[in-house]
Image: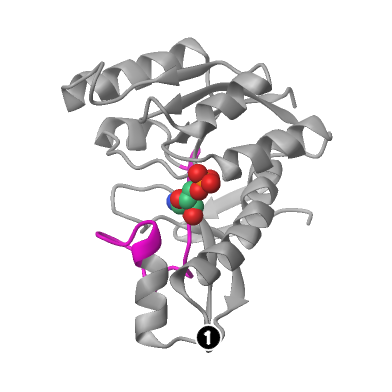
Amino acid sequence: MSKINIAVLVSGGGTNLQSIIDHIENGNIDGQIGVVISSKEDAYALKRAKKHGIEGVYIGKENFPDLNERNLKILQILEDKQIDLIVLAGYMSILDKNMVEKYKNRMMNIHPSLIPSFCGKGFYGKKVHEAVIEYGVKLTGATVHFVDEGTDTGPVIMQKSVEVKDADTAEDVAKRVLEVEHEILPLSVKLFAEGKLKVIGRRVTVENA
Ligand code: GRF
């Protein structure tokens, strides 16, 4: 199989983007990042892309105020670059249904909880970890899933749990979860790149693992 071409969509610091870059550079992921698209002009993720010689593009509310036009522009870039896999790595904007349909089982997202807990509308960023502490669960974690038309509802690719300790703040939990995000996201991308992920209904299995 030839190297897959990946688009990473970001809005923030881009530590997950960095984890994918690192695994590509050390030869662990057989793929390349063709483009990084950010919904925020000042996202540190764009600087990370630049540092590694990856094209970074800002497509947000300022340069594309209309949501439809924003989505069309993103779609055009993905098509021009012949993207095989889209990775949503902390992407905080809304994507078009057509795009989700077009990239079915070829678009993955990382969510900082064990789906189906603490996910869906309103559960993003720090809010997820605050809800975890408020509820009093003893375990939380991260989930990589394929994106479908719902919010955090697509087939689960991989999950990893972490402990929630008594004295934890939301920041402590976020930090612990982020560490496992950086394990399971690149691993999911690697398996995808090797053609090993199989989706049957809601179930994702790993072939020859
Ligand atoms: C991560 O916690 C991810 O799960 C969530 O947004 C955060 C992005 O962090 N979707 P980073 O920009 O990759 O550092």
Where the N terminus falls, by quadrant? Answer: top right
- Residue for point 54% across, 70% down: 172
Give above or below for 40 relative to 16.
above
Give above or below for 186 relative to 46.
below
- Residue for point 53% across, 89% down: 166
Give above or below for 147 relative to 2.
below
Name the quadrant containing residue 131. Answer: bottom left
Instruction: Judge by depth and name the residue closer to the eye, 14 or 28.
Output: 14
Q: Secondary structure at mark 1?
A: loop
- Secondary structure mainly formed by the magenta segment: loop
The residue stretch that appears in magenta: 105-127
Q: Which residue is mark 1?
A: 167
Residue 110 visible: no
Q: Residue furthest left?
A: 66
Number of callouts in the render? 1
| Residue type at tag 1 | Ala
- The percent position of residue 133, horizontal first and vertical second, equals 41, 80
Where the C terminus falls, by quadrant? Answer: bottom right
Residue 153 visible: yes
Indicate how the structure is coloured in the image.
one colour
- Report the side of 136 relative to 56 (left or right): left
Name the quadrant containing residue 41. Answer: top left
- Residue for point 51% across, 40% down: 13
Look at the numbered disc 1 and say if its residue's Cβ is closer than 8 Å to ligand 1.
no
Instruction: Judge by depth and name the residue closer to the eye, 8 or 134.
Output: 134
- The percent position of residue 171, horizontal first and vertical second, equals 49, 66
- Residue for point 72% across, 24% down: 3
Q: Residues within 10 Å of mark 1 (few under 14, many from 20)?
A: few
- Report the side of 58 relative to 8 (left or right): left
The answer to if 200 sits in the magenta stretch is no
- The percent position of residue 19, horizontal first and vertical second, equals 67, 43
